[in-house]
């Protein structure tokens, strides 16, 4: 009896993605976390010396779509100058996506310019129930 055809696009893959540019201090890691979680992907994201490092795992088609959306939907203050990817061994454990601790490497990335606060951030500063109430160093990343 012949075996049914194997669907390679459904096989899990894991990529290490290195993102260089203005990607620290602009809400990039929370954006990556939200995007990967919404797409049902596993892995992690963390700051490294020259940018952000991501390990992402899932079905090939989903991972490819993740990379496309990563570049097209990044926060407005982010500037992706270089994105490289390397295939690594799949863990296949179904891990949830996480924001990992930053590496201890010296930082050599560009610093984002100050940006104006949006109405939501201003509301947080003046809401006594918000943890950012009267916080003088609020930074908007939306």
Image: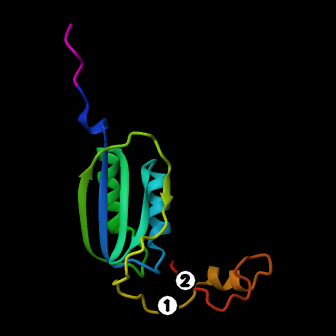
What mark, if any, has residue 32 been given in the picture? none
Q: Does the magenta portion include 4? A: yes
From this viewpoint, which residue is outermost toward the right?
Answer: 128
Q: In the image, is 84 to the left or to the right of 77?
A: left
Identify the main secondary structure in magenta: loop
SS of the residue under disc 2 = loop
- Which residue has dot 1 on it? 115
**Coordinates of residue 13 in the picture (x, y in percent):** 30, 45
The chosen color scheme is rainbow
Cα–Cα gap, marks 1 and 2 = 7 Å
Residue that protrudes farthest toward the left in the picture: 2
Occupied quadrant, residue 44 = bottom left
The residue at 48%/63% (across/down) is 100
Instruction: Label 1: state its secondary structure.
Output: loop
Q: In which quarter of the image is residue 117?
A: bottom right
Alpha-carbon neighbours of circle 1 within 10 Å: few (<14), some, or many (≥20)?
A: few
Q: Nearer the viewer, residue 23 or 95?
A: 95
Residue placed under numbered mark 2 in the picture: 140
| Residue placed furthest toward the front | 104
112 over 27 or under it: above or below: below
Where is residue 1? Give x, y as percent: 21, 7
Instruction: Give yes or no for contact between labels 1 and 2 (Cβ–Cβ under 8 Å).
Output: yes
- Which sits in the foreground, 79 or 109? 109
Which image quadrant for residue 71? bottom left
Sequence-earlier tag: 1 or 2: 1
Percent coordinates x, y for residue 8 in the rendering: 24, 35
In magenta, the rendered stretch is 1-5
Q: Which residue is drawn at 39% across and 39% down?
A: 92
Residue at 58 percent across and 84 percent down: it is 118
Provide residue 24's location: percent of width, then percent of height: 42, 78
């Amino acid at each position: 009896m012949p075996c049914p055809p194997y669907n390679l696009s459904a096989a899990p893959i894991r990529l290490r993605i290195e993102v260089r540019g203005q990607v620290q201090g602009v809400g990039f890691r929370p954006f990556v976390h939200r995007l990967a979680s919404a797409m049902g992907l596993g892995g992690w994201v963390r700051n490294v010396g020259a940018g952000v490092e991501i390990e992402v795992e899932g079905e090939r088609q989903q991972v490819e779509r993740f990379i496309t959306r990563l570049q097209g939907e990044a926060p407005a203050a982010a500037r992706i100058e270089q994105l490289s990817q390397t295939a690594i061994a799949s863990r296949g454990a179904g891990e949830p996506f996480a924001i990992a601790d930053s590496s201890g490497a010296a930082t050599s990335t560009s610093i984002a310019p100050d940006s104006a606060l949006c109405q939501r951030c201003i509301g947080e500063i003046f809401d006594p129930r918000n943890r950012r109430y009267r916080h003088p160093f609020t930074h908007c990343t939306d």
